[in-house]
Image (cartoon, rainbow, N blue to C red):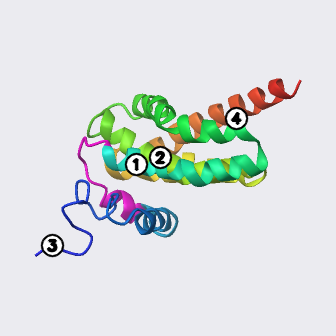
């Protein structure tokens, strides 16, 4: 007998992972868990190298993000919201992994830690004022908690690494927007 949330369609069957048989409720459950209980979310995050669940979460997060970008930014940003998140998650994970060298587990676990907050952030990235607050929450708070909890690096180190990377990325994004407007 399978436990609730564990079916043959569940990818790697973790309590915090994607359930293929219920994509909408799984998506909302993951978002709610990231907001309400981020420490618990990362405590139960499966420490496996399976990329399917986080990748599906990123793809699914790209759909509402694309809709919002279509409303606020146009067609090309909406298309980018669908295509860019998965490759971007691997680039960002490299930065966070280098910042948490010496922590437990390998690169794919760091990617899992980064993929879920990035998926959380994607829809907010389209909303003009909210994007910066959501970037700080996802990049510093959520990824920081993930690195401290899963990779077991010190909390201060995790926050400093995340604040540095998020700050640099925010400055780069701001400068890119300013250059594009000229």
Who's the residue at 45% across and 62% down the image?
27
Q: Is residue 63 left or right of residue 100?
A: right
Task: Check disc 1: other Cα within 10 Å, few if <14, some if 14-19, many if 20+.
Answer: some
* CB under 8 Å between discs 1 and 2: yes
- Residue 118 position within the rendered picture, expressed as x and y whole percent measured from the top left: 52, 46
- Labels 4 and 2: the sequence-earlier one: 2
Q: Which mark is residue 59?
A: 2
User: Label 4 vs label 1: CA separation?
Assistant: 22 Å
Q: Position of residue 103 (x, y in %)?
A: 31, 38
Q: Quadrant of the N terminus?
A: bottom left
Q: Nearer the viewer, residue 25 or 113?
A: 25
Q: Is residue 163 visible?
A: yes
Label 3 to label 1, Cα distance in Å? 23 Å
Mark 3 Cα-neighbour bin, 10 Å: few <14, some 14–19, many ≥20? few
Q: Quadrant of the C terminus?
A: top right
Q: Is residue 135 above or below residue 89?
A: below
Name which of mark 3 and mark 1 comes first in the sequence: 3
Q: CA distance from mark 1 to mark 2?
A: 5 Å
Q: Which residue is mark 3?
A: 2
Real-space Cα separation, disc 4 to disc 2, in angstroms: 17 Å
Nearer to us in this view, 87 or 82: 82
* Residue 83 higher or lower than 18, as above or below: above
Image-based side of 89 in relation to 174, left or right: left
């Amino acid at each position: 007998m399978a436990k609730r949330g564990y079916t043959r369609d569940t990818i790697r069957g973790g309590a915090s992972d994607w359930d293929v048989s219920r994509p909408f409720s799984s998506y909302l459950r993951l978002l709610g868990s990231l907001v309400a209980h981020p420490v618990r979310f990362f405590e139960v995050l499966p420490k496996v190298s399976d990329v399917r669940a986080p990748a599906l979460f990123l793809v699914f997060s790209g759909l509402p993000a694309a809709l919002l970008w279509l409303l606020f930014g146009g067609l090309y940003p909406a298309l980018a919201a669908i295509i860019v998140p998965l490759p971007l998650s691997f680039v960002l994970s490299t930065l966070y992994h280098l910042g948490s060298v010496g922590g437990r587990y390998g690169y794919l676990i760091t990617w899992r830690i980064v993929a879920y907050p990035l998926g959380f952030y994607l829809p907010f990235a389209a909303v003009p004022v909210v994007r910066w607050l959501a970037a700080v929450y996802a990049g510093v708070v959520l990824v920081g908690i993930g690195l401290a909890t899963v990779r077991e690096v010190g909390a201060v180190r995790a926050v400093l690494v995340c604040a540095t990377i998020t700050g640099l990325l925010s400055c780069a994004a701001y400068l890119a927007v300013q250059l594009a407007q000229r």
